[in-house]
Amino acid sequence: MLQPVNLLGTEGPSAKRGLYASIHAGVTAIRTSRKVAVSVLAAAVLLGVAGTWWFQHEAAPVRYLTAPVTRGIVARTVAATGTVNPVLTIIIGSYVSGVISDMYCDYNTRVKKGQLCAKIDPRPYQAALDQAKGQLARDSAQLAGARIDLARYAALEKQDSIAVQTYDDEAALVHQLEGAVQLDRAAVETAQVNLDYTNIISPVDGTVVARNITIGQTVAASFQTPTLFLIATDLTKMQVDTNVSENDIGAIKEGDEAQFTVEAFTDRSFQGKVMQVRQAPQTVQNVVTYDVVVDVDNSRFLLKPGMTATVAIVTARRIGVLRVPDQALRFIPGGASTAKPAASAAGAGVSAGAGGARQARLWVLREGRPTALTVGTGLDDDSYTEIVTGALSADDQVIIGEQRSSSHSRPGTFHFGF
C-alpha cells in the first residue's frame, strides 16, 4: 500500500525556505507573462480598429456625381389650376311661360344674330293681343261719338239752347274716353311684346354650347328666367379662370406669360397671357384665393369649355444665363478634409452679397478633387439657379453627389446634396 510522503518533513529549515522561494518565483513569472499577453492583445485590437477606420474613411475610393454648368433659361413660375371657358357666354332665357312647340337649334349649332332658335306656343298670347285690340277698337269708337256730341253741344251752348252743365258733362266724357283709348293702346303693345317673346331669338353670333329644353317641355317664367340655351360668342378665343393663393398673387401682374396643359392633350402645352387679375377674393375653408384670367388662342378648336387646366404663370425669366442645378448649392463632400478650398471660399450655405446677389458655395471637380468656389446667385426656379458672379464657366463640372465604397455605403449608392 502506498503511503503519503511529507516532503517538507524530510528536510531541514533551509530546504523549506528554498522550496518556498522557487514557488514564489514561478507565480511571479506567470503573472508577468499574462500582463504582457494582455498588452499585446490590446495593442493588436487597437491597431485593427485604426486600420479598419483608415481603410473605410481614408483609403476608401470616392466617386463624385457631377453635372455640367450650362447656359439656358431660368424661369420662376406660380402653379395653379383652373377651368377653360369661352370669353363671353350668352344665356338665352324666356320672358314668358308656355309649352315649347318648335326647336330650331341644337348643340354645336352655329347661329347668327336674330336667328330663331325655338318657339313657345303663341296661341294664348295671340288671343290676349286680339282681346286688347278689340277693347281698343270699342273705346276708340265711343271716343269718336263723344267728340261729335261735344261739337254739337258746343254750338247749342253758344245759342243758349242747352244748359252749361250738359256741355261740361259731355266734355268730361270725351276726356275719359281718351284716357281709356290710351290704356287700350298700351295693352295692345304689351300683348304684342308677350307674343313676340314666344320666339326665342339668338342675340349674338356664336355657337350653341348647351341646350336645356326639348319639344313639349313647359317653360315656367313666373319667378325666375329659365335658361334655354347657352351660346358662346367666339370659340376661337378662350380663357382659363385660375385660382391663385394669396401667397402667390403678389408676384402676378397683367401681361405675364403662362402655359398650361389639359388632360385631353397631356403631351401638348398651350400658351397664354394673364389678361386680368381680379380683386374679388374667394374664401373656401379659410383659404383665400384670387381669380386670375389667362387669355388663350383657340383657333384650332382643340380646347373645349369646361376642361381642367394645370397652369404655370411665369413671374420672372432669365434667358441665356449661366446656371447650375440646385443640388450643387446644397452639396457638401463627406470627406471635406481632403477637399481643396478656394482662396475666396466662404462658409457653406447662402448669404447676402453686394449688389443684391446672394453668396453661395458650391464644389467643382478639378484634377479629380473637389474644389470649393463662392458664387453669386440670382433667379432660382427650384430646378436651376442663375449664377451672376464667380469663377465659374460653362465648361466646369459641379458636384451634386458622391459615393464611398465602405461597409456603411452599399456599392452603387450615391449620396446627394439635398
Image (cartoon, helix red, strand yellow):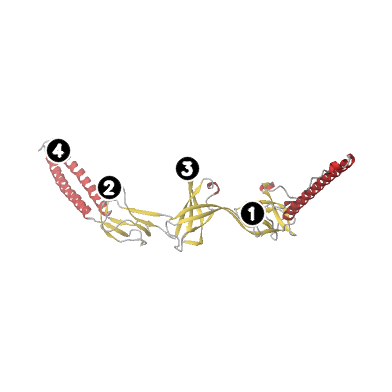
Looking at the rendered structure, the kind of residue marked 1 is Gln
Q: Residues within 10 Å of mark 3 (few under 14, many from 20)?
A: few
Q: Is residue 302 visible?
A: yes
Looking at the rendered structure, the kind of residue marked 3 is Asn
17, above or below 102, in the image: above
Contact (Cβ within 8 Å) of mark 4 with mark 1 = no
Looking at the rendered structure, the kind of residue marked 4 is Asp
Residue 56 location, x and y as percent? 72, 55
Mark 1 or mark 2, whichever is nearer to me: 1
Measured Cα–Cα span from mark 3 to mark 1: 35 Å
Contact (Cβ within 8 Å) of mark 2 with mark 4 = no
The residue singled out by tag 4 in the image is 169
The residue singled out by tag 3 in the image is 286
Measured Cα–Cα span from mark 4 to mark 1: 104 Å
The residue singled out by tag 1 in the image is 327
Q: Residue at x 61, y 52 (%)?
A: 380
Looking at the rendered structure, the kind of residue marked 2 is Ser
Helix, strand or loop at label 3? It is loop
Q: Which comes before the other along the chain, label 2 or label 4?
A: 4
Q: Residues within 10 Å of mark 1 (few under 14, many from 20)?
A: many
The residue singled out by tag 2 in the image is 222
Disc on res. 305: none
Residue 87 location, x and y as percent? 43, 55
Helix, strand or loop at label 1? It is helix
Mark 3 or mark 2, whichever is nearer to me: 3
Q: Which comes before the other along the chain, label 4 or label 1?
A: 4
Measured Cα–Cα span from mark 4 to mark 3: 75 Å
Tell me: 33 left or right of 256: right
Tell me: 298 left or right of 415: left
Q: Which comes before the other along the chain, label 4 or label 3?
A: 4
Contact (Cβ within 8 Å) of mark 4 with mark 3 = no
